[in-house]
Image (cartoon, rainbow, N blue to C red):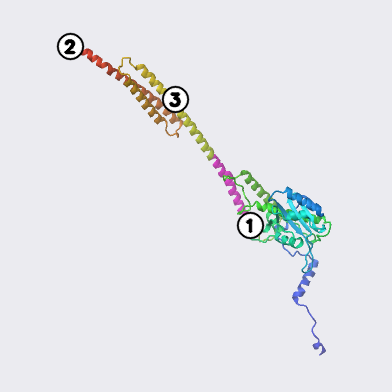
Amino acid sequence: MDRNMDSPPNKLPLWMIEPNRVDSVGDKKEKNPFQLSVLEDSLPFLEYNGSIIYSYNANDCSLLSEDILITLPVGAVLGFDIEWPAIYAKGKEGKVALIQLCESETKCYLFHISSMSSFPVGLKRLLEDNTIKKAGVGIEGDKWKLMRDFEIKLENLVDLADLANEKLKCKEIWSLNGLVKHLFHKQLVKDRLVRCSNWECFPLTEEQKLYAATDAYAGFLIYQNLINLSSDKQMQICLKTDGMLLPSEIKKELTSLSKEMLDLADCLPATFGQSTYIQSATEILADISENIKAVRSILLIKSNCQMELEKGANLGIMCSKEEKAEVSKLTSKIICKSNHYVDHKTAGVQNPHIKDEKEPSKKEHTSNTIFKESTEKEFLMSLDITEYELQMMERQAEEEMLHEVTSTSGDLSFIEDEENHPGTMENDDEFEMEMLK
């Protein structure tokens, strides 16, 4: 009786007991809660090997910021990021402790704001300057964070996630590490112990400095890479104003692609195991191979054929110009020789007994004019002729010139006979009259 009256012992539901069992198993064998892909797991880390300028004094920070404003041109970009300590309390958030700026691939600035007595005036002026771009992922959130903490109005911002979606024609939620993986086939070192460390603690450790500088450096690299991408593809081949492709730019793009392929090949593991993406990767590689063959055909085969055609056209133009010059010279020589020959012949056959000298001179001038016009019409023809046709034209011109000279001399002799014939007739009449007498 008493046993039946006792209340059953309190037991926890199964859903509250399962995690404990999993934890007990995990103590024996640790498992990674995130299953990375084979390619991402073996990606190399993005390393920053430039100089790191660490400033923890307000006056020094202002001087450095003023120097950045003076040296950078209008429209330059700074890789931007901020860090603050993690506070594990509801509704509380630490102030910005560190501001990172990267102006080039070899120089990064770390301004340790939490160790300064006040916010540097020079740095405030740099951050609020609208001629210098500040690029970062989620930079709008950083803007409002600085506004709440120090009343700094960050100007001329470039959100790398929005820029990536615009250039890559997609709608993704990008992280800084995701963009580094997609664009450079590398990954950032995201050590939780460093990322969630106390950024207010002075001085920063070497691991903290490198971590912070690498983030700003990654933002700078991502901006430079995205800004050079075309709007339709992930590359841009520069064009001249006349629309001709620059060979140097094509070589640059091909070299960049080859380096990316080599980096990808170096990152591949020895075995893939059972992956569902192998088939997709194989299809993409087949497409890449076909595209490379198409590029080779366009750049090497078709371009060489076009060059040969252009060379042939240029030679044809040069030959036509030379033939034109030779024909014009030949025409002028033949006309000059024919005129001189005709003048010489006509001068030799003139009779001093001709009564009317004006009529023969008019006939000679008319015949010379007709000869010049006919010769010019015959020789000033189309220039698309061969060397054989040119020789035939020379022979024909010589024969016609001799024919004209012969006919001219015959006309002159006929005119002379007619002039002498009346005189003969007068002598015969007188002789008959004398005979009749």
Q: The disc labelled 3 sits on which kind of residue?
A: Lys
Q: Residue at x 77, y 71 (%)?
A: 19
Residue 289 drawn in magenta: yes
Which residue is under mark 1? 166
Residue 433 marker: 2
Q: The disc labelled 1 sits on which kind of residue?
A: Glu
Q: Nearer the viewer, residue 181 or 239?
A: 239
Which residue is under mark 3? 333
Asked if residue 266 can be seen in this view, the reply is no
Asked if residue 77 can be seen in this view, the reply is yes
* Residue 99, image x, y percentages: 77, 57
Residue 186 marker: none
Q: Is residue 338 above or below residue 220?
A: above
| Magenta residue span | 285-308
Secondary element under disc 2, as helix, strand or loop, is: helix
Q: Residue at x 49, y 33 (%)?
A: 321
